[in-house]
Image (tube, helix red, strand yellow):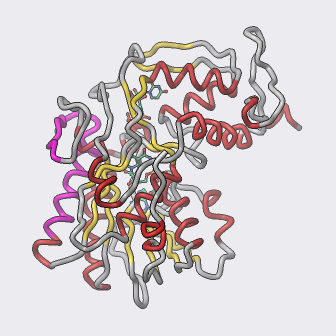
């Protein structure tokens, strides 16, 4: 496996005195807050707790260099004093959540990003936008390089997010052209790990929770659609490396793990790792669901010396262990060094908090 050079790691501690993370109480944002604090930065986290949770940042609340502000980025953001970095992550990422309030999602993408950009102008600091592989839509080019302009349905149910994120990218580059702002755009591919919401609706959290509870695994379509899953630690490291890259490195730059797997394969891997006897339950494929997705990460490797390090199996083990704890069950995964339980075909892994008391 390729290791990061020492230069790349030392670059991460350069000059980050005060970082703002919007969406910092969310899944990726809370890991980013952890990492920035560990690197000695002062961190202000802004979140409206739409899909984020205080649980994710509770351990940080007593940290002397951490501050949480409950705020909606659709309204102007005011921060006292100097700011050195803005990471703009505020936006629901799961189709289930971003589609419950599509107009609100579009406003978060567009108005929220403008508010982050205005703050960056005011503070004269770089701003990084958490964009997405969804800007490629249901791609006709595979795998997807950054040069591919995408194949997005502008009127479908995913458009509030896909087109919102595309508009956010346009704003980033217009603020660069018009005001000379230092901007960085990361196109994040499917990321997973501890702190995803149990009811998030995304495939990893759904399948793991279903497997741990002995519920049917809800495979949409035939399960032959593919995704490429990146463990959250790798992704956060990539975001920080992009932020600390030279001014000329603006992106858009793909950050993701190029290991492509079908959704049915993910289901089987999770069943094997949990020892669950859950069965597969096939359900209709949602409209505009992308059929294939895999990043070309040559630019991230060349410009940032970034490469994902965590193999799928290891990432799954860590994520399953997290959800098992959340569900108050022990992860029945031998590789975690725990005794395997409920692994027989006829046994059920359904354990609830109540049954543990
Ligand atoms: P998440 O839903 O866990 O986190 C998003 C956070 O933003 C939540 O804490 C939420 O409460 C907050 N938020 C939403 N709207 C807000 C608003 N108007 N004002 C303030 N806070 C708001 O999702 P995540 O997976 O952590 O994603 C973080 C970012 O990364 C998002 O911008 C998402 O689009 C992007 N991204 C994630 C993935 C992925 O696979 N996880 C893939 C591509 C892009
Ligand atoms: N998916 C699935 N069952 C689920 C949740 C999702 O089969 O319970 C599928 C979904 O249709 C998609 C893939 O898994 O093809 C990834 O879905 P997710 O919502 O995690 O991410 P996205 O579609 O945004 O990549």
The residue at 23%/65% (across/down) is 250
The residue at 18%/34% (across/down) is 153
| Residue 305 among magenta residues | no
Q: In the displayed structure, does residue 259 sit left or right of residue 296?
A: right
Number of marks: 0
Depth check: give the residue in front, 113 or 235: 235
Residue lying furthest bottom: 81
Quarter-of-image position of residue 328: top right
Residue 205: where, in percent of width, then height? Answer: 55, 36
Depth check: give the residue in front, 159 or 277: 277
Residue lying furthest top: 346
The residue at 61%/63% (across/down) is 57
Instruction: Please state, as top left, top right, bottom left or bottom right, where the C terminus lies in the image.
Output: top right
Residue lying furthest left: 178
Depth check: give the residue in front, 355 or 272: 272
Residue 249: where, in percent of width, then height? Answer: 24, 66
Residue 223: where, in percent of width, then height? Answer: 42, 18
Question: Where is 234 relative to 257, above or below?
Answer: below
Question: Where is 297 relative to 7, above or below?
Answer: above
The part of the chain drawn in magenta is: 147-174
| Residue 165 among magenta residues | yes
Residue 291: where, in percent of width, then height? Answer: 30, 25
Depth check: give the residue in front, 215 or 28: 28
Quarter-of-image position of residue 177: bottom left
The residue at 58%/34% (across/down) is 313
Q: In the displayed structure, does residue 100 sit left or right of residue 309?
A: left
Question: Where is 146 relative to 37, above or below?
Answer: above
């Amino acid at each position: 496996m390729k290791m990061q050079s020492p230069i790349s790691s030392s670059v991460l501690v350069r000059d980050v005195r005060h970082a703002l993370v919007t969406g910092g109480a969310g899944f990726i944002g809370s890991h980013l807050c952890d990492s920035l604090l560990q690197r000695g930065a002062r961190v202000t986290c802004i979140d409206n707790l739409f899909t984020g949770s205080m649980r994710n940042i509770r351990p940080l609340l007593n940290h002397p260099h951490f501050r949480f502000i409950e705020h909606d980025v659709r309204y102007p953001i005011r921060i006292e004093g100097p700011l050195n970095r803005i990471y703009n992550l505020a936006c629901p990422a799961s189709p289930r959540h971003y589609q419950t309030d599509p107009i609100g999602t579009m406003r978060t993408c567009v108005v929220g990003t403008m508010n982050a950009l205005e703050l960056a102008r005011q503070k004269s600091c770089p701003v990084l936008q958490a964009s997405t592989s969804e800007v490629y839509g249901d791609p006709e080019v595979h795998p997807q390089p950054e040069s591919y302009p995408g194949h997005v349905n502008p009127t479908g149910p995913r458009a509030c997010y896909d087109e919102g994120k595309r508009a956010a990218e346009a704003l980033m580059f217009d603020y660069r052209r018009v005001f000379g702002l230092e901007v960085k755009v990361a196109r994040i591919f499917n990321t997973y790990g501890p702190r995803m919401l149990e009811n998030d609706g995304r495939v990893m959290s759904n399948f793991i929770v279903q497997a741990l509870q002995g519920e049917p695994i809800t495979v949409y379509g035939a399960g032959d659609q593919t995704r490429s899953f990146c463990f959250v630690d790798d992704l956060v490291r990539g975001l920080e490396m992009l932020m600390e890259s030279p001014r000329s490195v603006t992106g858009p730059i793909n950050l993701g793990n190029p290991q492509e797997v079908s959704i049915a394969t993910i289901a089987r891997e999770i069943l094997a790792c949990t020892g669950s006897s859950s069965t597969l339950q096939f359900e209709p494929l949602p409209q505009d669901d992308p059929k294939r997705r895999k990043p070309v990460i040559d630019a991230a490797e060349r410009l940032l010396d970034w490469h994902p390090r965590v193999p799928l199996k290891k990432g799954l083990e860590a994520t399953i262990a997290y959800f098992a704890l959340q569900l108050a069950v022990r992860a029945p995964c031998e590789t975690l060094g725990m005794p395997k339980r409920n692994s027989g075909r006829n046994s059920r892994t359904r354990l609830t908090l109540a049954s543990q008391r």
